[in-house]
Amino acid sequence: MRYKIAAAGCAVLTLFAIASLEAHHSPSAIFDMAKHIAVTGTLTRVDWINPHIVIAMDARSDGGKIDHWTFQSNPPSWYRSVGLARADLAKAIGQTVTVEGVRARDGTLYGYMNKITLPDGTSLELINTAGPK
């Protein structure tokens, strides 16, 4: 009986480990790292959540239609490490921002944000362009 309980416990732990490994992924698994985009529009939402913050924005397409974009970004801990809080991004809600990043492989209006330019002209680049040390 003791072995059955131990085996069941190991099985449960293994399932949790597999789930956590699948939950975190490389950006290149979802995003086409060669498909760079820049989207300018109205920031509508900032979700300050783990494992990555998410922003939403409305941008006018070439045909005049409003597209609803969603961008994932670095985790909240990264933003805190560079001295930025949720309120710093949230104050731009309802205003025009420009997001540069890479687009989802499936062509949806989803991307990974590499840079955001806020309404006052300041920008935050979220990738490390320096070479290895």
Image (spheres, rainbow, N blue to C red):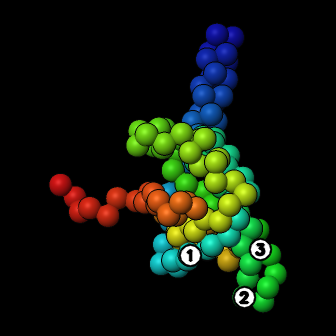
Q: How many marks?
A: 3
Tell which residue pokes out farthest to the right in this image: 65
Give left or right: position of 31 versus 64.
Answer: left
Q: Position of residue 111 (x, y in %)?
A: 61, 66
Could you say whether the residue bearing mark 3 is in a helix, strand or loop?
strand
Give left or right: position of 95 versus 133.
Answer: right
- The quarter of the picture where the N terminus appears is top right
Q: Nearer the viewer, residue 14 or 22?
A: 22
Q: Which residue is mark 2?
A: 62
Tell which residue pokes out farthest to the top in this image: 2
**Do residues under tags 1 and 3 come within 8 Å of each other at their CB atoms?**
no
| Above-or-below relation of 88 to 26 | above
Q: Residues within 10 Å of mark 1 (few under 14, many from 20)?
A: some
Circle number at residue 38: 1
Q: Is residue 29 visible?
A: no
Circle number at residue 67: 3
Q: Position of residue 9 (x, y in %)?
A: 64, 21
Q: Nearer the viewer, residue 124 or 112?
A: 124
Q: Nearer the viewer, residue 72 or 80?
A: 80
Tell which residue pokes out farthest to the left in this image: 133
Q: Earlier in the sequence, mark 2 or mark 3?
A: 2
**Do residues under tags 2 and 3 come within 8 Å of each other at their CB atoms?**
no
